[in-house]
Amino acid sequence: MSEMSVKQDKGYIAPPTNKVTIPDKKQIENAKFAMWLYLASEVVIFGTLIAVYVVFRFTNPEVVRQVHDELGIALVSFNTFLLLASSWAMVMGLRAIKRGDESGLVRWIGLTAIMGAVFVGLQYVEYSELAHLGLHLGTEWGMRFYAPTAFHGAHVIVGVFWALRIVARGRRGYYSPQNYLGVEIFGLYWHFVDVVWIFLFTIIYLV
Amino acid sequence: MASITAPTIGEGKVQPQAPSLRIQDYLRWTVDHKIIGVQYIATALFFFVIGGLLAMMIRWELLTPTLDVMQTGEQYNTLFSLHGTVMIFLWIIPVMAGFGNFLVPLQLGAKDMAFPWLNAFAFWIIPPAGLLMLAGWLVGPPEAGWTSYPPLSTLYSADGQTLWALSLHLLGISSILGAINFIVTILNMRPEGMGFWQMPLFCWAILATSIIVVMATPFLAGALTLLILDRVAGTSFFNAAGGGDVLLWQNIFWFYSHPAVYIMVLPGMGMLSEVLSVHSRKPIFGYRAIALSSMAIALVGFTVWAHHMFTSLTPELRIPFMITSLIIAVPTGIKVFSWLGTIWMGKIHFTSAMLFALGFLSMFVIGGISGVMLASVPVDIHVHDTYFVVSHLHFVLYGGSVFAIFAGIYHWWPKITGRMLDERLGKIHFWITYVSFFFTFFPQHILGMQGMPRRVAVYDPQFQTLNVVVSVAGFALGLATFVLLANMVSSLYSGKRAGANPWNALTLEWATTSPPPAYNFVGDPAPFADPYGYGTRESKEYLETLDKRFPPPVDDSLALTPNPQGTGD
Amino acid sequence: MSAETGKQTTTNRNSVLLIIAAFALFILGGFVIAQATPSLFPEQASAESQQVDDLFQFMLVIGGAIFLLVQGMLVYSVIRFRAKPGETGDGPPIHGNATLELVWTAIPGVIVLVLAIYSYSVWVSTTSAKDNEQVVQAVGQRFAWTFTYEVPRSAVPEDVNVADLPANIQQQFNDKGTFTITSPELHTYVGRNVKVNLLTQDSQHAFWIPAMRVKQDLLPGRVTETRFTPVLAGEYPVVCAELCGGGHGEMRASIIVHPDQETYVTWFNNEAARVFYPSEDPVERGQQVLASGAYPCAGCHILDELGWVGVTGPNQNGVADRVVNNRSPATGQTPEEYLFRSLYYPHEYLVPGFGPLMPQFQSENPGAAYYMPVEDGEAITAYFCTLSATQDNVCDLENLAAIAEAH
Ligand code: HEA
Ligand code: HEA
Ligand code: CUA
Ligand SMILES: [Cu+2]
């Protein structure tokens, strides 16, 4: 405090631009709360895109049925399973660091990243199959399908990079049983991406 | 009322001293919320001048019923498209965020926002986004209006329309990040002793606004994503020929944009509550009602969007939206009457801030009443997309939001800069603005009712007389703004020293130096229990203690010391 | 009872009276303001307009009263409660008044309820379907209006053999039993219930007749409709009210309300006769086709002879001379070839300074958009050939016929 008024003689001292401190309890609450708010707004965007599909689903059931017949759901079912499993790996990672098991954290979150990456790869396979069937972005069904799924895919890609960052930090020993906020926040995001996919999978492939 | 009597504000500790800030301090990346707030406000003012310049060109063109200043209709369409977009997304919304940034942590006695880095990031998205918008001029500017209805904005517009959409996307991200920060700050960072019901009404307004931003702006993001896909990726979400639907855009766009009009006015209403109470030296009348009506407006605001679509929506669906739109008048009325109750029996000081606040009351009500008329379907059918709507929107946006911003500038300028604005220039600014504002926008009601559509450069010659009146008054309105700008510049160099609390106000931002030091307060500030507890003995004592701790500046003519307040070290 | 309380009651009674008087004054003021209504609107040319104006007038009474109330309280406050110079004290610490707050929540609540009910009743009575409606179709395209009417087979005069009529008209009879005539104005007559079906060829537009107080958007991919009943003969503007591009301001037309059915029928038969007895002279036929508004040229071009005022495309006054003097030599085509092909391939014949905005007409598919049969193309070209300073025909009409034949 007194230190501050001394410094003032040299002009205005702005707060430091990046604090690398162990966040206090309040800051933890804040960060989680902010993440929830962010996810709420994401829900709205996905909601808009999904709603566009749903309306089409109701007004053009025959087109959708035809797509279902031609496509089959083996691949996406596997993909869905993969994403669910990655969520579980994510939880295991968080549990590991809470117990102080740093290498566990790195392993589990690494697995999460790998599964996310495979998901994206398989999604690409799925897309090329669809393109083969002539269901490209310019078709009535195609545009309503690609917009939400590609938007979701972009979220998975972001999530993979985020996970890799956590892995990198974890290897340097950044996280500890006292400081695992970053992992927790990532967890919220990853679960969200997972849940969105469950919705997409159900709405696009199952009904 | 006040249960805590005159809290001791770090008495006996080190005397805080106002920092001296230089222009350079504002031109670089920093995570200090006060500087970010000023950065927002300055950037927004810059775009206000751009938007105003475009408006002047609109009015110049409309002096005659034929195309003359502009070569083609498209060029004219560009003018109002960018005027509307710039004014809304680069002036009103950022300037409100600027006031929020500067004031919310101060009013809460916090050191900064919850996420300082995020805060700076959200701001720095804005300048490039603004440039991106204006860069449209290089590739064929947008010309489909600020509402950009497809297929005009998809099949018939140049590439500037894509830049327009990208730019709005960025601005949307910026306001979502800002809003998340506000919500967390307001809910989690209030000081000991400040419950929700002791929070300044400006914070309530920012809270309500931020909730709208977080829930509504993503809709805009969704709509823009689809628009961009339609323009560059060959989809046809909005193209009937390819199985799309033009009403999809209208529905999503207005589902965002109606709530957005409350994003634009609620913070202004928050500022108004502060200014009216302080400058009439009387507690706010019906504090809870004002706070809750913000929430009610935010909520009901989500149910009215299709009142912008009364001529395109399926007829059966129009009536429900009429009813919800009419209902919005009730919570807004509560605010207006509560403000009238606030100044009633007060001791009204005609400062420039107060004049603009009173100007808001008197002009916003006109815009509100015309809004209620628009909400009635049979009347709207006739006046939709005419100058009646243009009039309505300027009465609420200029007579409402902008008047409130002006009031806010006069009120908080001393806190931001440590210097007073010239009151005489302020009054000149007010009177020219007030009168020319009325004559710029009131006659537009009549033009619209008599049959002049909006967004036209070529109009029926019978409307010329009124248009000339409007244009001339519009030029005066533009010039009046220079009085404010001149006042600001001269105050920076030679304005009277302000002291910590020039208006004797009770909210916490006044319980520190002007401008406040880094981290805002020395020690943990204790708020006065009732932010509007004027007229009580306790408040008087509290203000006296404040004055002791932050002695008001000595008369400028006598003060030769560079820093007259806070001589204690 | 002491004298003190007696005085109290009188002041109370006085202030109640004062408040009532003030409110009466505000409402009276609202009535006075509302007297302006008729001068704010165009003439009331439809049955609906009277109801809409009455609703508006009612809202103006209420809005005017609220306006006076708020401004009155403001002005009163700033005069009565202004701080004297040098005064530093505070106002009384009043924080609210539950009764008052309830009142100013409830009264606006009641007002908006009344407004909702009244508006709803006007809405229902102005928009419900009426018996025996005249159905007109209005087509909007950038930047012109075309109105089309159906002529039943029974209206074909005795002396006309359907088999002799142009092919596209026979086709229409075969397809739908009627054929379509077009007009750049909307014609109807006093007392007739009109239903307008609206469709657009391109972007959105909005069909607005200020004098009738009706407006409805034209939406791509949909047919929308609006209804009204004219009560006053005359000619009124039809305006496009939805931004549709650079020529939005020029996208206007008229509605002509004939005083009675007879004059309307006379007009209608005249229009139909043009089709039943087509002129032998291609120039005259071309002029008739253009004057009928069958094509949206008026939206973008100026042509004084036909009253076109659009400014988006090149000016057509004296086009024949310009073609002969500049364009023909520049392209090496004959004037008739240049003009004819400009209709079907406008983007290959851009006049310097103008962009490729003109719709591409086609003569192959009668069902598709921008259909212009070759006969029309030929006639229009022939007419354009006469738009010279001397009014002479600058083209070789036989060559033109050959070009058309080959097309
Ligand atoms: C700050 C921005 C702002 C605000 C606050 C408002 C407030 C309101 N607006 Fe406005 N509006 C716009 C900005 C705003 N609007 C814009 C920008 C457009 C044009 C968009 C475009 O097309 O470009 C628009 C257009 C618009 C339309 C569409 C018109 C059309 O295109 O045909 C409608 C229709 O219902 C409408 C209604 C209302 C209503 C009912 C309110 C209400 O919230 C008003 C409530 C306030 C009062 C009523 C006054 C105070 C109350 C009292 C004193 C109590 C007593 C009163 C009564 C009982 C009546 N507005
Ligand atoms: C906050 C929002 C805001 C603000 C402040 C304004 C301010 C002004 N507006 Fe704007 N306006 C909109 C929001 C706003 N507007 C919107 C949303 C639309 C709809 C767009 C659409 O249809 O898509 C619109 C449309 C609109 C139109 C209708 C165009 C049309 O439909 O064809 C007109 C016409 O008169 C107009 C005029 C003005 C004027 C004269 C001002 C003045 O108040 C401006 C005064 C200028 C300044 C205060 C800046 C300082 C002045 C200068 C730097 C200029 C130099 C001075 C001189 C040459 C004298 N506006
Ligand atoms: Cu058609 Cu505007
Ligand atoms: Cu609205």
Image (tube, rainbow, N blue to C red):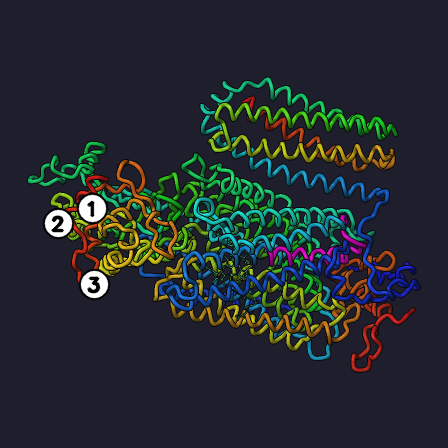
Q: Nearer the viewer, residue C281 or C288?
A: C281
Q: Is residue B478 magenta?
A: no
The disc, 3 or 2, on the residue closer to the chain's N-terminal end is 2
Residue at 83% x, 51% y: name it. B192
Q: Which of C358 and C341 is in front in this view?
A: C341
The amino acid beneath tag 1 is: Glu
Q: Mark 3 lies on which chain?
A: C
Which mark is on residue C281? 2
Residue that mark 1 sits on = C378
Q: From the viewer's perspective, tell me whether residue C117 is left or right of residue B130.
A: left
- Helix, strand or loop at disc 2? loop
Give above or below for B146 relative to B22. above
Do tags 1 and 3 sit on the same chain? yes
Give above or below for B562 relative to A44. below
Picture quadrant where residue B199 is located: bottom right
- Helix, strand or loop at disc 1? helix
Residue at 59% x, 33% y: name it. A150
The disc, 1 or 2, on the residue closer to the chain's N-terminal end is 2
Q: Does the magenta stretch include residue B93?
A: yes
Give above or below for C196 relative to B542. above
Task: Read off the magenta span.
Answer: B90-115
Picture quadrant where residue A124 is located: top right
